[in-house]
Image (spheres, rainbow, N blue to C red):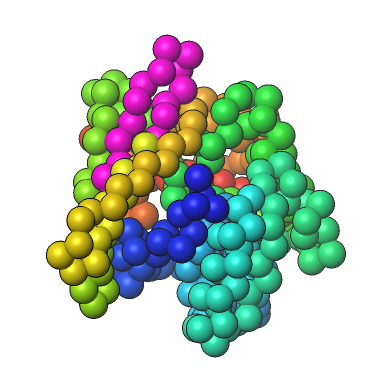
């Protein structure tokens, strides 16, 4: 799915707005580790097109990024070159970060943003993933996870997400995202993309992938089992309190023991 989306992924994320919203909170969480210009070593897992890592590098951090999709990594490298910053992007998936970055470990911080962790579909795989995260971090290092609030999604059967639109010259894109709730407890994440140039007919494309809707309690238990401590819980990247019924996101800020 993400190889296919790599060329248009940046179209359905308003990165200027998103980074302006998220960076103050992210920098606040990183601040106890020291100044970015020290520099801090930060790994963005499931980095997609690399925009968070690029912004951290622009601010002085020693940033790295990993993604299972090689085409996403290629796009991230292009974005970094266009931004004029150096970021160490490598193809690697959950559970494979230590092996991929062994020559530059440990990290001061590891990020897992954008609802990426739900691509881990079972409890054994979650343990492997979180243990891999811990191994990549120095003692006292910070892990920050941003997921959708699946407590609310499941309790309210929240199927549809807000549509996204993008224009570039006379080209238009519309992105529609929705869930199918499966009998085995997983969720199918569907993305319908509509694209046209000028007044030409719309071209339609569908993509789908499987997610597991991890709830807050499940993640906190798994984090402790993987050796993380001092778990702080927020309802979004604005630092708002978490409410299982109303928060749009579940943000976990934890430390490696």
Q: Residue at x 60, y 73 (%)?
A: 77
**Quarter of the image with the C terminus in it:** top right
- The relative height of residue 25 versus residue 78 in the rendered view (above or below) is above
Q: Residue furthest top?
A: 183
Q: Residue at x 54, y 68 (%)?
A: 75
Residue 5 counted in the magenta span? no
Foreground pick, 176 / 28: 176
x and y, in percent, of residue 35 in the image = 57, 76
| Residue 87 as seen in the image, left or right of residue 49 | right
x and y, in percent, of residue 253 in the image = 51, 48
Q: Residue at x 48, y 32 (%)?
A: 211
Foreground pick, 140 / 128: 128
Q: Residue furthest left?
A: 199
Q: Residue furthest right?
A: 103
Could one spot residue 7 in this view of the protein?
A: yes
The magenta span reads 175-189
Q: Residue at x 57, y 82 (%)?
A: 81
What's the magenta bit mostly, secondary-structure-wise? strand
| Residue 233 as seen in the image, left or right of residue 200 | right
Could one spot residue 217 in this view of the protein?
A: no
Q: Quadrant of residue 23?
A: bottom left
- The relative height of residue 101 versus residue 198 in the rendered view (above or below) is above
Foreground pick, 213 / 68: 68
x and y, in percent, of residue 48 in the image = 52, 58
Q: Residue furthest bottom?
A: 84
- The relative height of residue 89 versus residue 124 in the rendered view (above or below) is below
Q: Quadrant of residue 196?
A: bottom left
């Amino acid at each position: 799915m993400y190889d296919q989306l790599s060329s248009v992924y940046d179209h359905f994320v308003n990165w200027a707005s998103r980074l302006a919203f998220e960076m103050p909170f992210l920098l606040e969480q990183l601040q106890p580790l020291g100044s970015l210009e020290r520099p801090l070593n930060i790994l963005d897992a499931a980095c997609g097109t690399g925009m968070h890592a690029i912004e951290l590098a622009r601010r002085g951090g020693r940033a790295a990024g990993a993604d299972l999709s090689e085409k996403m990594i290629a796009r991230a490298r292009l974005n970094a070159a266009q931004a004029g910053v150096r970021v160490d992007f490598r193809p690697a998936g959950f559970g494979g970060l230590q092996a991929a970055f062994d020559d530059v470990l440990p990290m001061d911080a590891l990020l897992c943003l954008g609802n990426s962790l739900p691509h881990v579909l079972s409890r054994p795989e979650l343990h492997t993933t979180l243990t891999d995260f811990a191994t990549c971090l120095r003692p006292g290092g910070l892990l920050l996870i941003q997921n959708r609030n699946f407590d609310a999604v499941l309790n309210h059967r929240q199927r549809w997400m807000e549509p996204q639109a993008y224009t570039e010259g006379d080209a238009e894109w519309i992105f529609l995202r929705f869930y199918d709730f499966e009998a085995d407890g997983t969720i199918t994440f569907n993305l319908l993309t509509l694209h046209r140039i000028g007044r030409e007919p719309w071209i339609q494309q569908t993509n789908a992938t499987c997610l597991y809707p991890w709830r807050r309690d499940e993640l906190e238990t798994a984090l402790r089992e993987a050796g993380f401590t001092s778990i702080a819980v927020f309802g979004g990247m604005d630092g708002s309190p978490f409410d299982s019924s109303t928060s749009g996101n579940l943000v976990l800020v934890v430390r490696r023991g």
